[in-house]
Amino acid sequence: MKRFFMLLLAGLLLAGCSQSIFTPTTLPSLPVGTLIPYFTATPTPTRLAETPMPASPSPTLSPTPFIHTVGAGEVFSAIAARYGLTVDELKAANPDVILSPFLAGQKLIIPGQSGFTPTPLPPTPTPLPVQSNAPLCLADAAGGAWCFLLVHNPLAESLENLEAVLEISAASGSVIRATASGLLNLLPAGASLPLAAYLPAVTPPLEVRLLELRALPVPADDTRYLPVRLEDVNIQIASDGRSASVQGQILLEGEIPATLVWAALSAYDAAGNLVGVRRWESPTAIQPGVAGLLDGRVYSAGGEIVRVEVLLEARP
């Protein structure tokens, strides 16, 4: 029995020491597949409906504007009257025009059709005996200068469209011809109105002289201006004399409402020189029997202000 177990153990040892022989398994042959092409459906293009292009509108030809070249000594209001326009209509057509100083050589667009024939210039009117003080130019902090002229109407009739042609000689040797315009259109009989022109770039000191003063008489039956007066006037001059505030009640003297009301504020120094002007415009219409409020301020371009005068103009 013992011998049997010894033989069995020896057999097992011999089997563990022997190398096993690997025989590869032959893979079965795979069938060769046949590639079947897959055709995708080619989309048929859809023809879009053709939208006809809108016909281009024929361009509207604007008439060639008539151009007026300002001549020496011409004034803005006279040019407007020559072409049958109001001053406001001519200004609206030329928003960039320099009115102060109004220099010769400027180009003005005259609204209307091309080929417009202006009204022939009227004969030179007989000069009116209008009085004025000597013009004065005052330099400002912006490098320009204000030129003032006070005009008095000694006549029994009112005047309008006052303009003065000034010749200004600067320290640089240049000579400028400028037009000073009234702060208001109307100068009533016995009243005084300041005229002003601004020179944007001049070198002081300046010498100025009056070359010509123009005005037109207002017909007695004219209805373009309304009678108006100022009551309860309150003028407050600043402690440094550089400015003054003006308040008052504006009253019409008729039954027609005023859609345009202006006030010319004129400031004077101790020597009686005109040193500052300002045109105040009412923001609203004024009705008969209802007082309108004047509330404006005027500044000095020269000496201290000691006195302020106010002149009104009202139009329907």
Image (spheres, rainbow, N blue to C red):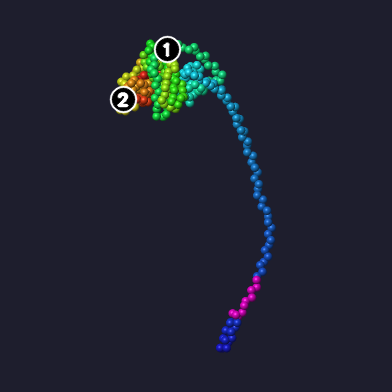
Q: Nearer the viewer, residue 290 or 277?
A: 277
Would you say 304 lies left or right of 114 here? left
Tag 2 residue: 236
Q: Judge from the rendering whether residue 271 lies leftward or rightward of residue 88; answer left or right.
A: left
Find disc 1 in the rendering and name its residue. Answer: 128
- Mark 1: few/some/many CA within 10 Å (<14, 14-19, 20+): some
Could you say which quadrant of the image residue 251 lies in? top left
The range drawn in magenta is 15-24
Disc 2 residue crowd, few under 14, some 14–19, many 20+, Cα 10 Å: some
From where the camera sits, is residue 7 visible? yes
Residue 181 seen anywhere in this rendered image of the structure: no
Name the residue type under label 1: Leu
Give the residue displayed 64% in from the left and 45% down from the top.
43
Secondary structure under the numbered disc 2 in the rendered image: strand
Q: Residue at x 51, y 17 (%)?
A: 83
Image quarter of the N terminus: bottom right
- Main SS, magenta region, reads loop
